Amino acid sequence: MNHRHLIAILRGITPGETIAVCEALIAAGITMIEVPLNSPDAFTSIASASDSFGDRADIGAGTVLSKKQVWAVADAGGTFIVSPDTNRSVIEETVRIQLHSYPGVFTPTDAFRAIKAGATGLKFFPAEVLGPKGIKAMKAVLPPEIPLYAVGGANPDNFAEYLAAGCSGFGLGTYIYKPGMSAEQVSERAVAAVAAYDAGKSV
């Protein structure tokens, strides 16, 4: 399955909202969807989304802190793990059971620790602190095949800057979804994000 490198982060979503919001995201062209585990009844949302959209989207979990949580995500049908840190055991277990791993990094030391553990891609967080210049400087010493995602402060207004700095894509949190937002509001923002991403990638 080919995806844009756009991950919708649905922090705080409830199981009752999940299907409508995922449908809106997929229709707009965002097919990597993360449910952070500190959301209400997150595993129910992951299982529901995976059952409904597993043939059209990758459903994963964020804020994953332990191997036990990795296993639970896999049992719920999740296909990728986003962790806030470079916990080696989480990364290695994720890869061992053939899920994709996107750990959070902030420094070159973090980045190389994650790569050595088998990370699929790196989540630069908070990107707004590092900025495109900081990420570009680190990109120069990282393996070119490792995709980099800017998370935290990334939005359609600055996609082009981060892409020019060497990022492959973005994790979109409060820009794309905040508790209480309707599926229609999510759709509007998703459409704008996809348009900006596609425009930036075509440059």
Image (spheres, rainbow, N blue to C red):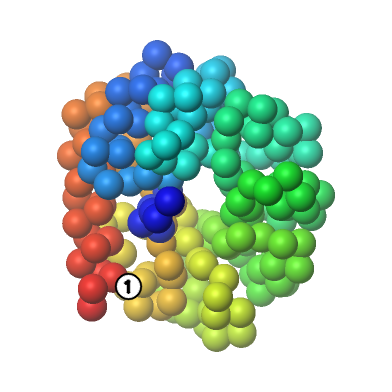
Residue nearest the viewer, comparing 61 with 52: 52
Q: Height in image: 181 above or below 148? A: above
Q: Residue furthest top?
A: 16
- Residue drawn at x 40%, y 14% is 16
How many badges with numbers are in the image?
Answer: 1
Is residue 168 visible in the rendered image? The answer is: yes
Q: Height in image: 13 above or below 173? A: above
Tell me where residue 27 sits by quadrant: top left
Is residue 90 visible in the rendered image? The answer is: no
- Residue drawn at x 72%, y 62% is 118
Which quarter of the rendered picture does the C terminus lie within?
Answer: bottom left
Tell me where residue 108 sits by quadrant: bottom right
Residue nearest the viewer, comparing 179 with 76: 76
For disc 1, the neighbor class at 10 Å (few under 14, some 14 to 19, many from 20) is: some
Q: Residue furthest bottom?
A: 140
Q: Height in image: 48 above or below 70? A: above
Tell me where residue 19 sits by quadrant: top left
Q: Residue 102, position in %: x, y?
A: 59, 54
**What amino acid does circle 1 point to?**
Glu
Q: Which residue is mark 1?
A: 161
Q: Height in image: 137 above or below 158? A: below
